[in-house]
Amino acid sequence: MTTSHPSPHTRASAVLPEPWGSLLQRANQIARTSDMKELYRATLALLMDVAQAEAGAMYQYQSDVHEVLCHVAIHPQARGVGECYPLEFGLLALQPENPEIAWYPQVQEEEDWPRTPGARLYPNAQSLLVVPFASQGRLIALAELYNPQKTPYPELSFLAERLVSELDKAAGIFARWRDNARLQALIAVIGELSSTLDKDRLLRLLITYAAELLNAEASSLFLLEDESRELVLHLASNWKEVPVEKVRIPADKGIIGHVVSTGETIITHDTQQDTRHYQQVDRSSGFLTHSILAVPLRVQSITLGEDLGQRAEHIIGGLEAINKRIGRFTQQDANLLTLLANQAATILEVADLYTDANDLFLGVIQAMVAAIDAKDPYTEGHSRRVSEFSIAIAQEMNLPPDFVHKVRIGSLLHDIGKIGIPDEILRKPGRLTDAEFARMKEHPTIGARIMAQVHTLQEELPAIAEHHERLDGTGYPRGLRGEEISLLGRIVAAADVFDALTSDRPYRKALSAEDALAYLHQNIGSHFDPECVEALTRAYLKEKVRTQKERIALQRALDEL
Amino acid sequence: MTTSHPSPHTRASAVLPEPWGSLLQRANQIARTSDMKELYRATLALLMDVAQAEAGAMYQYQSDVHEVLCHVAIHPQARGVGECYPLEFGLLALQPENPEIAWYPQVQEEEDWPRTPGARLYPNAQSLLVVPFASQGRLIALAELYNPQKTPYPELSFLAERLVSELDKAAGIFARWRDNARLQALIAVIGELSSTLDKDRLLRLLITYAAELLNAEASSLFLLEDESRELVLHLASNWKEVPVEKVRIPADKGIIGHVVSTGETIITHDTQQDTRHYQQVDRSSGFLTHSILAVPLRVQSITLGEDLGQRAEHIIGGLEAINKRIGRFTQQDANLLTLLANQAATILEVADLYTDANDLFLGVIQAMVAAIDAKDPYTEGHSRRVSEFSIAIAQEMNLPPDFVHKVRIGSLLHDIGKIGIPDEILRKPGRLTDAEFARMKEHPTIGARIMAQVHTLQEELPAIAEHHERLDGTGYPRGLRGEEISLLGRIVAAADVFDALTSDRPYRKALSAEDALAYLHQNIGSHFDPECVEALTRAYLKEKVRTQKERIALQRALDEL
């Protein structure tokens, strides 16, 4: 450790003659920041100081669009920061391929002056000094200095040469930071999308986030309708004028039609002039589009499982971001929207698969229980109505949706055990003998036994097994009492009796809903759970449930119209 | 345009005295690149030239771990690039808070020398010059120059001061570029995960990508088992020694238990010393863990839909990345793995929901058709066997999995119309009268009518409607011929007759499988589709299908064991 000896920290100002030592010192100092805006600001301030300028502005050159973006302006009435200008407007003699310092001692006399950013920033400027920052002939940035008292070309060149690589790198950091922020936002959006299987909510989230991620004024989402081969504008953000469902486009027309039929991405900067633009959309929506970024909604190949195989990749529609707020839609924007659209399309497809699986299940059991009910004309439609009444009771009791779903399934299946009861008993017009009734009373047990094999249906079984139990223990098949009967069983019991009472039977006419509810109320505590009866009564008063007779009457009234 | 006049492009070498003009010129030149490795290389080369050194290496200082990372070495036998070294080893007198140039004229006599990176890079070095690059006292990088002929401190300081901000910014670009690449990889992984609903495949993908994304030697995935409250090692990458299912951990034990029970993230750099580490895992797996990054698998709150409600956020297990290959697990690694784990957990949950919905559907219709079959003791289990035979035929015909799934559903439901046939006909022990048989023949039509209401079941209907049609038009109910009968109908027809023939009937004993297949072959073209019969025969010969009698015999044999 002993042989190391410290060197004096050699500052540029100590070894270089003035003004170069101080200038390099100040430039090195400025360069310590990696923050792009701060670096632009400090660089401009240094240049203004060196040239003793009254005001100044500094721009980043964006070679892809041949524009400059104003990052900073130093002037009492500074305006125009954050705005973009085409390079040909007002930066006068500047050539991006071979940029050199330019001096306009009488800038007001320049023909292009009124179109320059400077004319907005400092309308009364007399003179203008433009300092380019270029690396190997490649323009990176430029500074405008207004009314300078000096034009020290060597010093300005010296500083530009020292700082151009710093400006370039700071812009590189900023661009990647912004990409990063966008990717992180995208991941958060994907997380939110993938945790919803509700298609409507999914679509709403998607268009909201599409516009937000891309900083666009609006976004719209078209889904391909298989039957009509039309693209249906499903949702749009910020389209106030008309209901979106009015807008339909033939599947191969317009920008979105092209995107959906070819799978290509389209960016337009002047939509009104684009021959592919389907003007009808603007007319229908009352929304004027200037620029569009449109990408397909492409569902990836989905692996459903060993037994279920795969769904091939396919396009289900298209997603548009409309009217970029600042600048233009770029290739990066297109990449980002494509990532979002593909992910969203896959999530939408999964949500559809899930919804289809549930719909198929509900549809098939509804059809089956309807067929079983229909064996006895007096019980036609019974299970479906009991299910509706049971759901209404559960909802009125403010039970959570996952419980309500169990109520839906369990109540639909409550009489499934009738499969095991002989037709002659089910359809017997007169009163049943004791032996027949004893047989009939087996249906809850038979039904529960049939469904007990289904391991994912265990929580719904009480609806089947216990819907003929009564609170006082006089029910069947087990004679359970009070809380021994599950909530599910108590709900379906009330719904079942309500439907039975309000339907015709071979031995009596249907009761009115009021009389049936009165009967239920009379038997609260002995037969029925008070909360279930109250909930059913509330649901009836709110017209959330209708008896069979009321349905028939309503249908007849509608038919007569 | 006329008043602008070009300035001569002022180079540093034109205004500054030597050697400063040339040095600044060369530094400005080097600084044009934004590529970190190239900038390090060019900077080192310049320093070596100035000091006339024989060899050199250049390091980036990583303040979070107090280590240096070797980016470049210039020497004929250059080694150690890409490696990290603790700062206290061998960089000798260097203080990161107040770094100054250090000179070791007799480096072999330094006590620390053998532990320095230089001792690996240039074992016979005589002298060493260490040049720090620091910005406001903050160490950014350092260069080692071996056997320099000169020790020009002012020039080296001048260059370090000029270039430190460039090195810092280039590193900033590189770090953000790397973060970006990782986020993009994560998005691609999420895309692949979210396009599979097959849980086994999902888990395999997840552990593979977890190790890959984090550059870890291995990864492992534990799922919480509800019943046992144990964490079960479900899958692990690169664990060769034992079957992973052997490893079970109490839900609150070990690092992974802590993560799962608290929801916290854990990073350990010395796992063997960590008291939370559950040594049993290493012993069982034969895999020695040095460092671990463990995160919970947290399912976000899932919106199932309006009717289905929400599933609350919950933790289903934990994910570990094990043994970081280069460097240490960082907070960024933890963030990335958390993003992956949360997304994967949600996708896993959705896959479970989808699987549950399908299982529920299949379970309920199996139970229902079994109950209908059981009305007639002679047809008990018929629908389930016909479904198995039909699936075997479809698979032998190499039909795609989504068609096979339609076969599965359609064949299970093929006799559903028997719900509408009176028990006295279904269960009649003797031959049916003509009138009764005419009634019986309605079951395909009745079944199709029942299920036609289910809009998502349309493609399965032919299995119900056409399973009694024959190729020559002598079948019922519609007397369709040849290709008029759907493939689904032809498959189920062959399977249905095969099961009927191989089951006892009131009026005859069961045929053997061989006799039944012979009967089918005799009626190819008239009754049955040749391809379906051939496929069934192949499936039988491969023992993929068994008749009812064979099942009973097999069960009896098993019972006797």
Image (tube, coloured by chain):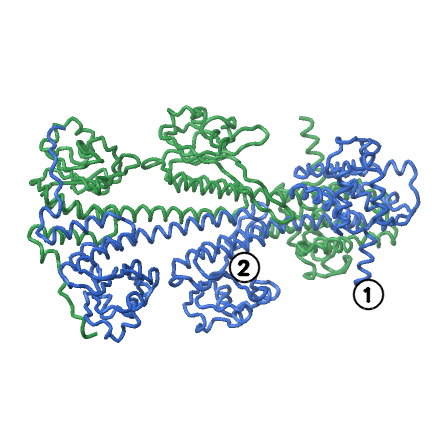
Chain colours: A blue, B green
Quarter-of-image position of residue B468 = bottom right
Can residue B398 be seen at all in this image of the molecule? no
Label 1 neighbour load within 10 Å: few <14, some 14-19, many 20+: few
Name above or below for residue B65 compared with residue A193.
Answer: above
Q: Position of residue B27 (x, y in %)?
A: 16, 51
Q: Is residue B511 left or right of residue A282?
A: right
Q: Amino acid at mark 1?
A: Glu
- Residue B50, position as x, y percentages in the image: 10, 45
x then y, percent, for residue A477: 81, 33
Q: CA distance from mark 1 to mark 2?
A: 42 Å
Task: Give the chain of mark 2.
Answer: A
Is A319 rendered above or below residue A177? below
Q: Is residue A110 left or right of residue B425?
A: left
What element does badge 1 sit on? helix
The residue to which callout 1 is attached is: A560
In this view, the residue in front, B74 or B347, is B347
Q: Residues within 10 Å of mark 2 (few under 14, many from 20)?
A: many
Camera-side residue: B546 or B289?
Answer: B289
Instruction: Tell me whether circle 1 and circle 2 mark residues in contact (CB < 8 Å).
Output: no
Quarter of the picture holding the C terminus of chain A: bottom right
- The residue drawn where x is 57% and y is 28% is B228
Most extreme residue toward the front is A76
Q: Which mark is residue B307?
A: none
Q: What residue appears at the point 25 percent right and 52 percent down from the top-left corner?
A: B34
- Residue A417 relative to residue B247: left or right: right
Quadrant holding the N terminus of chain A? top left
* Res B234 seen here: yes
Residue bearing mark 2: A316
Residue type at tag 2? Ile
Query: Callout 1: residue from which chain?
Result: A
First-in-chain label (1 vs 2): 2
